[in-house]
Amino acid sequence: MAKDYYNILGISKDASDNEIKKAFRKLAHKYHPDKGGGDEAKFKEINEAYQVLSDKQKRAQYDQFGSAFEGAGGGTGAGFGGFDFSGFSGGGPGGMKFEFGGDTGGFGDIFGDIFGGGGGRGRQQERGTDVSVDVEITLEEAVIDTERDINIYLSSICSKCDGSGAESGNNIKSCKTCGGTGQIRKERRTILGVFAQTEICQDCQGQGEKPEKNCAKCGGDGRTKENKNIKIKIPAGIADGQTIRLSGQGEVGFRPKSGKSVPGDLYITVHIKPHQIFERNGDDVIYNLEINFSQAVFGSKIKVPTLQDEINLKIPAGIQSGKIIRLKDKGFPHLQGRGRGNMFIVVKMKTPKKISKKQKKLLEELREEGL
Ligand SMILES: [Zn+2]
Ligand SMILES: [Zn+2]
């Protein structure tokens, strides 16, 4: 089950960032699920590999702990070192997160923040705030790829200045206060001597440039709070409590069009409503089937609902109460990789509470016969 991300992308271990990007683009294009001949599972795998290898920090950790994936990837759910795989179904901190690609509409990386550290975040004002949203879906929706429209109120690009922060007709100019460096050097005299300190220039907020005249709508910030509709895709096989990360779909940063500004991420935690007849266990689904005594003795054919359709289940003659029948591949699709879980039908014999006179008589006869 070990995943060789280099192998998946068809590159060598010392591939450059550029080679990684090239290989990813080519493969992602080829296997994109929206295309004829696309392959969603393969596409997810490619994304996963890319998300790790394209991030310096994650790549280094992967290179170092690569073998850990072999140990932990067997599906046991055991944690290994710093990577808490047991957090998978629970979501929350340390839980596994995955991501959709921003504008491709396809699926993004499954691993997401599994390695913890999010890397350099830049200065506060340059990176927009992350936003978290909760979404509830049904169990049936968790079986297939599902779409949801969500409405959130968040900092967006100012419609008047299109994120530049400048009043129309005005240019962005180099900041005079700091000479375009975004920083101001100050000397502090203390008993111990003179210390040089650099501070972020308040005038341009560290940008090194600012509008000649600020936009009247956003005050030069380049962003305003708006209600925004976002269409999200929830991948088949998602478990209750799991979080999807939409990279760059959070709040925009200070002057979003400055070229230095990075939007925050949008985190969507998916909750799955309990189901009336199905119970979920990992990627398996459990269904309790009650049969009566004669069905158990003679065998029977019974219509049984599955997650997506209905089957005619053959109950063999002489079945014992408590017997579990497995329907292969009738469970939830695996979120990672191919295939799906199974359905387990727990057969239980129902004891009648109310019986007719005739039934009573027949049962008494059975009793005489030792049944
Ligand atoms: Zn504006
Ligand atoms: Zn300045």
Image: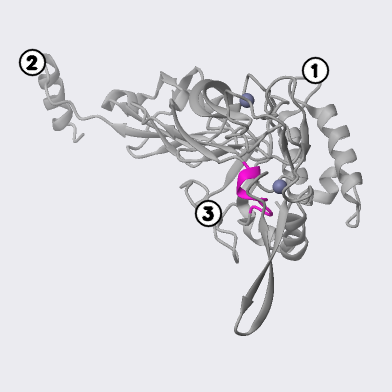
Res. 193 visible in picture: yes
Q: Position of residue 222 (x, y in %)?
A: 64, 30
Describe the element under mark 3 as helix, strand or loop.
loop
Relative placement, left or right, of 30 versus 322 is: right
Q: Amino acid at mark 3?
A: Gly
Q: Identify which residue is drawn at 52% across, 50% down.
A: 95
Q: How many neighbours does mark 3 have within 10 angstroms: few (below 14), some (14-19), or many (20 or more)?
A: some
Residue 255 drawn above or below residue 353: below
Disc 3 target residue? 94
Q: Amino acid at mark 2?
A: Lys
Q: Amino acid at mark 1?
A: Gly
Instruction: Point out the tag, 3 or 2, that comes first from the N-terminus.
Output: 3
Describe the element under mark 1 as helix, strand or loop.
loop
Disc 1 target residue? 36
Q: Position of residue 85 (x, y in %)?
A: 56, 55
Contact (CB < 8 A) between labels 1 and 2? no
Query: Which circle, 1 or 2, is nearer the viewer?
Result: 1
Residue situated in front as seen by the camera: 363 or 205: 205
